[in-house]
Amino acid sequence: MRTLIVIDMQNDFIVGSLANEKAEAIAKPIANLIEKGGFDRVIATMDCHSENYLDSLEGKNLPIPHCIDGTVGQELYSPIATALGKHPSAHILKKRAFGAIHEWKEHLFPIISSDLAIVGTCTDICVLSNAIILKSMFPNVKITVLADLCAGTSPEAHENALKAMEQCQIEVIRSHVAQ
């Protein structure tokens, strides 16, 4: 069974408060992958913060409110939301931090597959942390990151994160053709 994990393809990371042109550029290819990629299951994560985000440790280190519960910025970017709506086994996983350890335990343990593919944003924060968590939880499951369908905070940060994941025995496919 193949599962696609789509990390944080939300308005605030694509066109909102933390807009990223690379994230916008990968949105349509990810939507196409969801619709045509042959995945048995798709799980999309959503970063979810409370109104008092700026009082949190993350808010103190990144003082830009984003993905606040109930806002347009928190919503999945339209092409992603539309593609998920068409997939028969799509699931949305809301998480309160970069990595979703408690959420993965609750939602993924019962449905673990033999192959996980990861795409999304930001390579050097949320993609990296979730890939490492998943590798730690499922050390014998093949985990692949499709590098050209991930967007980092900078080209250098993107590349450093990909190298770190490779060091942790996560396969990084750098030449996946995004359609």
Image (cartoon, rainbow, N blue to C red):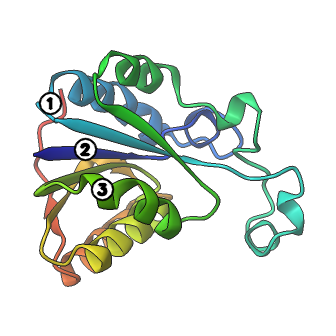
- Image spot of residue 117 (x, y percent): 21, 51
- Image spot of residue 105 (x, y percent): 42, 65
- Upstream in sequence: badge 3 or badge 2: 2
Comparing labels 3 and 2, the label whose residue is closer to the camera: 3
Image check: 76 left or right of 61? Answer: left
Query: Does 98 sit above or below residue 84?
Result: below
Comparing labels 1 and 3, the label whose residue is closer to the camera: 3
- Upstream in sequence: badge 1 or badge 3: 1
Q: For residue 44, what is the image quadrant?
A: top left
Q: Badge 3: how crowded within 10 Å, few (<14), some, or many (20+)?
A: few
Residue corresponding to mark 1:
37
Camera-nearest residue between 18 and 138? 138
Q: Amino acid at mark 1?
A: Gly
Residue corresponding to mark 2:
4
- Image spot of residue 123 (x, y percent): 40, 60
Q: Badge 2: how crowded within 10 Å, few (<14), some, or many (20+)?
A: many
Proximity of marks 2 and 1: CB atoms separated by less than 8 Å: yes
Residue found at x 16% / y 54%: 113
Image check: 62 left or right of 107? Answer: right
Residue corresponding to mark 3:
110
Q: Amino acid at mark 2?
A: Leu
Camera-nearest residue between 155 and 142? 142
- Image spot of residue 25 (x, y percent): 39, 32
CA distance for labels 2 and 1: 9 Å
Q: Is residue 99 visible?
A: no
Q: For residue 22, what is the image quadrant?
A: top left
Residue found at x 39% / y 60%: 155
Q: Amino acid at mark 3?
A: Pro
Q: Is residue 5 visible?
A: yes
Q: For residue 74, what is the image quadrant?
A: top right
- Upstream in sequence: badge 2 or badge 1: 2
Image check: 74 left or right of 70? Answer: left
